[in-house]
Image (tube, rainbow, N blue to C red):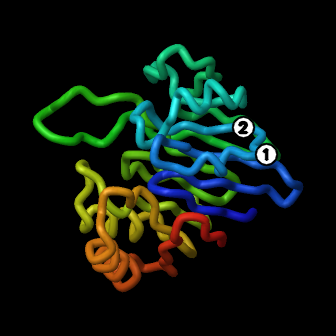
Amino acid sequence: MRLTKYTHSCVRLVHDDGGVLVVDPGEWSEPAALEGADAVLVTHEHEDHVDVLRLRGAGLPVYAPAGADLGGLPVTEVATGDEFSVAGFRIRATGGAHAPVHGGKPSCPNLGYVIDDLYYPGDALTPPGEPVDTVLVPVQASWLKTADAIDFLLEVAPRRAYGVHDGQVNERGRGSINAWYAREGGTRYRWLAPGETA
């Protein structure tokens, strides 16, 4: 598969057979991420992961966690453990809840997706429950501690990892976090700039 990173939490996956799947096209991601897409996966309802108006206009099939509040956007609801195929990719949903932020504030449904041999956890550090080749790891978030993300990488032990969820951190902070992940994460780690492909 070919992976292209867009701003913050959005990635575009192109299957070897040509199918295009976009994950978490949020309000900060570029509209180009959806061009020619076959379907969209959404990990949870927060605006940095899903631009409801843009998706409504795009008319693409959208798969999202059961119970997510997406303002009436038509979706196929997905639950933990569900397995399905979209755009040529085999997908299994894992996790179930957004990581706690602070003070017991209400959470929302959050699914991680194993997409062939790639794992995208959304806003949680739930392990995939199976070996995976590639992990997309959050760089920065209000719910995230760098040490916990490193422990997540060590536990999952992928062959490689790419940083996502980086839209709220400046270049200096991103450089520091990327260095920690590369040095301590136990895997080949790389950060992709928006529009860069691996």
Pointer 2 with pointer 1, Cβ within 8 A: no
Q: In front here: 195 or 20?
A: 195
Residue 25 in sight here: yes
Q: Secondary structure at mark 1?
A: loop
Q: Amino acid at mark 2?
A: Ala
User: Is 47 rendered above or below residue 89?
Assistant: above
State the image quarter where residue 130 is shown: bottom right
Q: Amino acid at mark 1?
A: Gly
Q: In the orientation shown, which residue stands out farthest toward the left?
A: 103
- How far apart in space, not on screen, are marks 2 and 1 (Cα)? 9 Å
Direction from residue 34 to residue 47 in the image, left or right: left
Q: Quadrant of the C terminus?
A: bottom right
Q: In the orientation shown, which residue stands out farthest toward the top?
A: 72
Across and down, in percent, residue 10 comes to: 54, 51
Q: Residue at x 45, y 23 (%)?
A: 68
Report the residue marked by disc 1.
36
Report the residue marked by disc 2.
39
Q: Secondary structure at mark 2?
A: strand
Q: Residue at x 64, y 62 (%)?
A: 4
Direction from residue 44 to residue 169 in the image, left or right: left
State the image quarter where residue 166 is shown: bottom left
Crowding at mark 1 (Cα within 10 Å: few <14, some 14-19, many 20+): few
User: Is 62 rendered above or below residue 171?
Assistant: above
